[in-house]
Image (cartoon, rainbow, N blue to C red):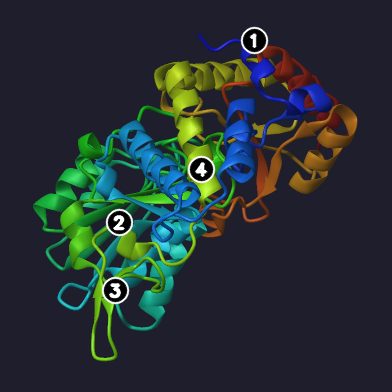
Amino acid sequence: MISEKIREDFPIFKKRKFIYFDNACTTLKPQCVIDEVVRYYSEYSGCAGRSMHRIGKETEAAFEKSRAEIADFVGAKKEEVVFTKNCSEALNLVARSLDFSKKRGVVTSVLEHHSAFLPFQLLADAGKIKLDVVYPDKESWLFDAASWTEKIGRDVRLVVLHHTNNTFGTQPPLREIIGAAHDAGALVLLDAAQGVPHSETDFKKTGADFMAFSGHKMLGPTGIGCLVARSALLEEMPPFLVGGETIASVSLEKTVFAKPPHKFEAGIQNYAGAIGLAEACRYLRKQGMREVERHEREMFAYALAKTEGIPHLDVYGTHDASKRSGIFLFNVRGVSPHQVAIMADSMKGICMRSGVFCAEPGMKFLGIPDGACRASFYLYNTKQEIDVFAETLAAVAKTLGR
């Protein structure tokens, strides 16, 4: 059961007095994750896949054990998990390695994170693909399946969509969209940066062909992420980066690349990051991902109730907590979102994001071109913190709102 006691696992709460509501950006780290990272650097700081000595072999064993742990956490096979430095690199890997020579169509949405949108915009600008964009309903700000399926024709090679939106914490109708894509012979790339950390995610059950996520958004270290992909696709695709560890043999005439996933992992890897991410998976599994999801929805519903009636406050997106994760998006009318965020920090130590959240096209489409404030909750946040948050917003709105 998620409770306030869980905060004892996070050493930062013992060192600083603050309220951390910027979890959609990055999350805090429990002591067990920090310990595993430190243990790698202090006890067996070797190099995997190269050295025959004991420290090197211990590193290799821990690295591959971590891959297996992470794969199991997301419902994938070990050989389907490629380590990257973050979700952005994983998304770029697909954009740069997938063959678009026979079918050039790519369908995505206006609400995608820049990391999912920009790689394909660049390909479109270079004339390598034809990019088509789906828009949500302007009243509910939700997608229906038809808005996607009508754009997914036989000329579409890839559908790129979010598992959970980083602006509102809502999900598109994934099953219907993925089904329609496969019916049309298209592949699906799922940006799960906001999905894997916040809900029970099973790659095989989603039906997606590719899935990307980052460790730092799920209690893990920074600088580590994963691309999960069907083995057959990884076999077909050429490596995005090349170098040490990506090869089986090299001659002046020809290079034979290693089997996936290693052919996509050029150079020294972030061993500490992978080991720390595996520990984060173990920690989240212990808490229960369904409990994490339930807790976030409860936090959103409570924040909605506590802020109801605050003058000049606009809360964006559907108010149905069953359709949201723990992302509370708002503005105080007449006040810059950056000013609201700075005041909340200076008044009560509330850390939250302000701006367009790497989703500028979507914010413009929805009529919020100057951005908004985003309070995002996670498993260690409490209702008492939301009480302080609501009181702070009320004071700012009363003083400056109009």
Q: Which residue occupies 62% across, 45% down? A: 41
Relative to 147, say whether 320 is above or below.
Answer: above
Describe residue 171's horizontal placement relative to residue 15 as left or right: left
Element under disc 2: loop
Q: Do the residues under discs 1 and 3 have CB atoms within 8 angstroms?
A: no
- Residue underneath mark 3: 130
The numbered mark, 4 or 1, whose residue comes first in the sequence reads 1
Q: Dividing the picture into quarters, in which one does residue 341 lie?
A: top right
Q: Do the residues under discs 2 and 3 have CB atoms within 8 angstroms?
A: no
Number of the front mark, 3 or 4: 4
Mark 2, other Cα within 10 Å: few <14 / some 14–19 / many ≥20: many
Element under disc 1: helix
Mark 3, other Cα within 10 Å: few <14 / some 14–19 / many ≥20: many
The front one of 143 and 169 is 169
The numbered mark, 2 or 4, whose residue comes first in the sequence reads 4
Number of the front mark, 2 or 3: 2
- Residue underneath mark 4: 215
Number of the front mark, 1 or 3: 1
Q: Amino acid at mark 3?
A: Lys
- Residue underneath mark 2: 261
- Residue underneath mark 1: 5
Element under disc 3: strand
The front one of 247 and 289 is 247
Q: CA distance from mark 2 to mark 4?
A: 18 Å
| Residue 150 seen in this snapshot | no
